[in-house]
Amino acid sequence: MRGRRRTARREMTVIHRSPGPVLFLAVAFLAGCGSLLDKPADEAPGNLLANGSFEVWGDSGPPGWEIDQSGRNERLDPDGDSCHGNIAAGVTCLHPDDFVVLSQTVAVQQPGLYRAHVYLRTLMPLRGCFLIVETVDRAGRKQEAARRELRGQLGEWRPVSCTAVVPEGTIALRFLLRVGPGATGDASFDAARLDWLQ
Ligand SMILES: [Ca+2]
């Protein structure tokens, strides 16, 4: 995966949640990431994202996630030093022009308040890194609804979240983890969630 340009800046893919078998660790999740170390992989109920804990990886990365990257010296790799389950998503950007964007587009049925959440661990200082929520209307127009800079404590897992007000007419939400351009360093992500609050 190193240095290989991922060509497909794909058309919007609407991911519908599949209710498949899950293990529920919501209480432990809410208690904090440290309590989930070495616990089995799970997708806690209510999460609109697929493979939010990055437990599943294929030849082209974690299934469920769209990946856009600069094709320079950036890397996206499974990281076994996870905070939730067994695997996290590790991103490395060596040059300020490098970038990696992990995103999911999910269909939404109702307007209201949505919360995006992810655990982040940084190993080097990062700039230009954001958790973003965009709305998509029936015409396919995207609009940013929430943004939070991804900043963490070096070497420690920390939660980052933001809340988006989603108006009537929205048919989908995009959840984005953007690293760069402008970022140099390492970041790992785990336990990504997108929840409808009310
Ligand atoms: Ca995980």
Image (cartoon, rainbow, N blue to C red):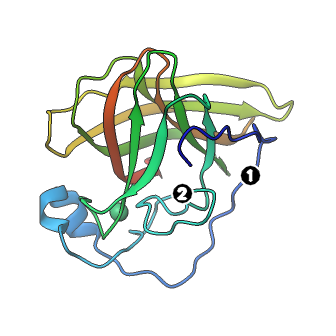
Where residue 128 appears, as percent x and y from the top left, is: 41, 17
Dot 1 falls on a residue whose secondary structure is loop
- When the figure is inspected, residue 45 is found, relative to residue 136, above or below; the finding is below
Q: Quadrant of residue 150?
A: top left
Q: Percent x, y for residue 67?
A: 62, 43
Give the image location of residue 36, x and y in percent. 19, 67
Which label belongs to residue 48? 2
* Above or below for 126 versus 28: above
Q: Residue at x 44, y 15 (%)?
A: 96
Amino acid on which the number 1 mark rests in the picture: Val
- Residue 14 tag number: 1
Horizontal arrangement in the rendering, residue 178 relative to residue 186 (left or right) = right
Which amino acid, by three-letter code, is at mark 2? Leu
Q: Mark 1 vs mark 2: which is more N-terminal?
A: 1
Residue 66 located left or right of residue 62: right
Could you tell whether 94 is left or right of 104 in the image?
A: left
Whole-angstrom CA distance, mark 1 to mark 2, is 11 Å
Specify whether residue 166 is in view. Answer: no
Residue 149 in which image quadrant: top left
Residue under the image location 46 percent in, 63 percent down: 46
Residue at screen point 58% across, 42% down? 103
Compare residues 187 and 23 and report the one nearer the observer: 187
Q: Nearer the viewer, residue 190 or 71?
A: 71
Q: How many marks?
A: 2
Observer-nearest residue: 115 or 75?
75
User: Residue 97 appears at what percent x and percent y?
Assistant: 52, 16
